[in-house]
Amino acid sequence: MTGATEYPPLFTYFLTIFYPIAKFGRTAFMIAFGIVQLFCWLGLVLLLSKMLKNKLRILGFALAPTVIVFLSRRFDLLPTFLVLFSIYLWVRKKEKISGVVTAAASSLKVYPVTLLLSFLKTKGKNLLQFTIYFSLTFLLIFLPVLFFQPTTIFFPLKQGDYRDDTFVGILRLSGFKIDTSFATIVSIIFLIVLVGLAFFKAHSFLGRTVALIIPLVLTHHYFSPQWNLWFLPLLILSYIDLTKILTFDFISALPFMWGKIAEITGFYPELFSLNSYPSTLLILLRYAFFLYFYVKAIRCEKFGNKQMIFTELI
């Protein structure tokens, strides 16, 4: 199994909400889905405003390229909202509700499970209550699937070769001959090492959470800029300069935006193909930013922004 995470079963439940609307056509579906996404976007902005005093950074998130591009498409804003809401509840000492919300988020996407590792390293909290409520909620969500469709409980991981815009792809572009099987082994080792370092070496809750999410993106067999949404709100809460964050986000979203423009106009010069020099440069810059964020998240004693309202996250 190579990289990219499929959606857990709760995603199917979520989509059933839109089935009656989808009967009226694609436009009706996109409008309804866009409304849900818009509420998630507003919820994220509201949560950030309750956790950070710096309004410019909050505005930077609200208008970030990947946020705008994927506001009416893809699905990642909802689990991202739930992740940030869970953290907000955690610092407000509402561990029970935080456990429920984290379970819901983890049932929609796999990456919110990293919150469990972050919470395990946090002192002075009622971790037992969180764990109990997380487990019960997770079980209740998965029981119907286990009862009616037991084979889907082990939802598959996408399989296929690693594309040129991945970490393995960079190694191949550098001249290393890596077949898919060996690439999988390399990615798994890379994932274990990075997650282990994040868990044991990160000094702050915020830094640890960012450092635990980034390896999941790095070891996928392809890259989608929507995955920036997984940790973009957490970077906004960090001390890292806003210009660097938005530059990284723009670099990540640029190939996707250009591809959509090309679909509409039919103009797609070879200069912007995946194997071209400009695209390779963008890929290298993107992974340089990933590693920069990862190293900072692990090494900094205080990863949070000085204007954070909840100083324990710093």
Image (cartoon, rainbow, N blue to C red):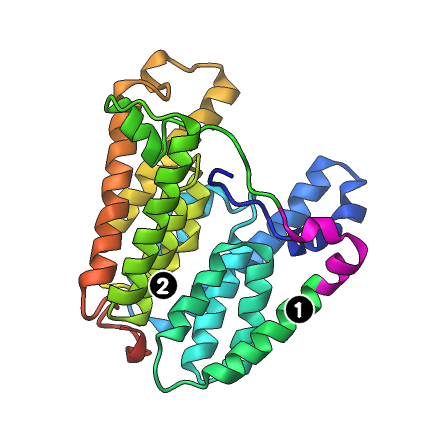
Give the residue at mark 2.
209
Foreground pick, 163 / 269: 163
Residue 17, horizontal then vertical, whole percent: 74, 54
Is the C-beta separation of discs 2 and 1 under 8 Å? no
Residue 229, horizontal then vertical, whole percent: 43, 51
User: Which residue is at 27% across, 63% downward?
Assistant: 238
Foreground pick, 188 / 273: 188
User: Which residue is at 34% across, 82% downward?
Assistant: 123
Above or below for 300 versus 129: above
User: Which residue is at 44% across, 14% downward?
Assistant: 267
Disc 1 packing (10 Å; few <14; some 14–19; many ≥20): some
Calculate the distance from the C-alpha at mark 2 to the C-alpha at mark 1: 24 Å
For the residues carrying marks 2 and 1, which lies nearer the camera in this image?
A: 1
Q: Amino acid at mark 2?
A: Thr
Disc 2 packing (10 Å; few <14; some 14–19; many ≥20): many
Residue 135, horizontal then vertical, whole percent: 59, 73
The part of the image, by quadrant, that contains residue 211 is bottom left
User: Which residue is at 46% across, 44% downward?
Assistant: 226
Left or right of residue 226: residue 200: left
Above or below for 62 versus 94: above
Q: Is residue 288 visible?
A: yes
* Stretch of the chain drawn in magenta: 143-155
First-in-chain label (2 vs 1): 1
Q: Is residue 50 visible?
A: no
Left or right of residue 242: residue 181: right
**Residue farthest left in this picture:** 300
Examine the structure image and report whether residue 153 is included in the region drawn in magenta.
yes
Give the residue at mark 1.
139
